[in-house]
Structures are given as C-alpha cells and as structure tokens.
Amino acid sequence: MKIDTLKFGQIEVDDSRVFDFVLPIIGFDDLKKYVILDLNKDSLFKWLQSVDDPSLAFPIISVAALEYDYSVDLNDSVIESLNIESAESLLVMNITSIPQDNPHGTTINLLAPLIFNLDNHKAGQVVLSGSGYDISYPMFKIDEGQTCS
C-alpha cells in the first residue's frame, strides 16, 4: 500500500506492517491506523506515521534501548483489548518531544507508552496510572552547571 506523508513524501508499506490502534492515542481518537517507519537504521528514533492523516507522525523510541529503570504493568482490560497472549509478542515504544531549536531538550512520555502486539497488529496508548512516571521525562541528563548548546 502507498501512503502519503507530509514529512517523508509518498512511501510504500506492506499492509502487514499497519497497526490498528484499538486503544487510541490520546487526543487522536479518530485515527486508528499507523505504521512504524524505521528510516534510519542507525538511529534509536523511529516514526509512528498515521495512515489516515499525512501530516501526523510521532517520533518514538524504545526506552529499553536507553537502559532506564522502566517497567510497564498492563491491567486486564488492556490485555483483553489487545488480545495479548505473551509478553514476547509485545513492543513497547514511547512518544518523544524533540524541540527543533534544542534537541538536547528532548523529552519522553513515560506515563503513556504505546503497546504493540506484534502477533495480531493491535496497538494502543496506555496510561500507567499511579506509576509515578512523567509525561515529559528528560532524555538527556545534564549535570548541574553544564549547558547544552
């Protein structure tokens, strides 16, 4: 299938790579179909591109690659909604916010990860209530007195 994107032009993706967000991304309830774009194999960042809205693409990252102390506990309703049968079938990604004028100011939404079931291509954004995680956790820690430029 070919999809039009604002950021990347027209791209061709296999239908099998499209995820159905049965638990929608907060604020984007009407957009259900997304694909993960891995445009730079050397980068930790990937893009979650809406299939239905060419202008919507989220930069995402796997927190596991950053070696943060981070765990995701899914409640029974999420497990049921995504038809999760094993933890091995899951991919957990987090939306990032990357300021254009200061990439070192990048933050990660740890409170509401994206959960992908690789077995059935169902996905969703899940709020980890009571976890204490932050919606805008700084990706780069800066020592006091040090500046980013």
Image (tube, rainbow, N blue to C red):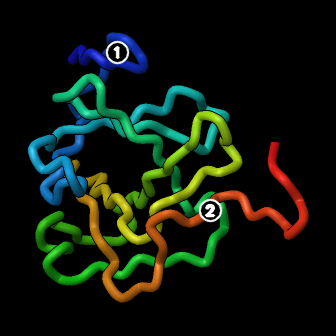
Residue at image position (18%, 83%) is: 76
In front of the other: 113 or 133: 133
Query: Looking at the picture, does residue 76 appear above or below residue 134?
Result: below
Residue at image position (23%, 57%) is: 26
Which residue is label 2 attached to? 138
Residue at image position (50%, 63%) is: 136
Q: Position of residue 15 (x, y in %)?
A: 21, 28
Q: Residues within 10 Å of mark 2 (few under 14, many from 20)?
A: some
Q: Position of residue 21 (x, y in %)?
A: 18, 50
Say which amino acid is labelled 1: Ile
Relative to residue 63, is residue 118 drawn left or right?
left
Which residue is label 1 attached to? 11
Relative to residue 44, is residue 112 drawn left or right?
left
Residue at image position (16%, 46%) is: 20
Q: Position of residue 91 (x, y in %)?
A: 40, 58
Q: Quadrant of the N terminus?
A: top left
Q: CA distance from mark 1 to mark 2?
A: 31 Å
Q: Residue furthest right?
A: 145
